[in-house]
Image (tube, rainbow, N blue to C red):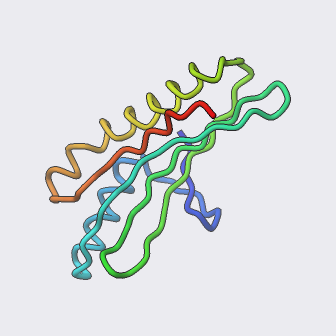
Amino acid sequence: MKWRKFNGENIHLPIKEAVAETIKREAENGIKLKVCIGTDSQVKGLDTEFATVIVFLREHSGGFMYIHNEKTKQSYHIKERMLVEVAKSIEIAYELCDLFIEYGVEMEVHADINTN
């Protein structure tokens, strides 16, 4: 999986290592983090593009995010696509959950289940 920062800079480490380094760095600077994970999608012609984000919120100090984009030719019914979004978010949250527990980082998963 390729991840990048919001400014377009590629993240070369596996995402779990990059997140661990980020949490450690912020903690060393005395910053408390909260992490929000979510996925959204958009249909463009025959392609469906999913964007998953890991948003790091700094208490009283803004935030930053890591982004993963994925395109597929598979077509989805709207309800199915919403479930795929949630599944992608849960998958990355589950992969990172032990880090959040270890470092006491609050985490939430955003589920956009409104089909409008």
Q: Nearer the viewer, residue 12 or 92?
A: 92
17 w.r.t. 89: above or below? below
Residue in the image at 54% along x and 35% along y:
114
Q: Residue furthest front?
A: 116
- The x, y position of residue 79, in whole percent, is 57, 21
Q: Quadrant of residue 31?
A: bottom left
Query: Does residue 75 appear to the left or right of 3 in the view shown?
Result: right
- The x, y position of residue 32, in whole percent, is 24, 72
Tag count:
0
Residue in the image at 52% along x and 56% along y:
11
Residue in the image at 58% along x and 41% along y:
40
Query: Does residue 50 appear to the left or right of 45 in the view shown?
Result: left
Quarter placement of the C terminus: top right
Residue in the image at 30% along x and 36% along y:
94
Query: Does residue 15 appear to the left or right of 27 in the view shown?
Result: right
- The x, y position of residue 35, in whole percent, is 34, 57
Q: Residue furthest right?
A: 45
- The x, y position of residue 45, in whole percent, is 85, 29
2 w.r.t. 6: above or below? above
Query: Does residue 47 appear to the left or right of 82 in the view shown?
Result: right
Q: Quadrant of residue 73?
A: top right
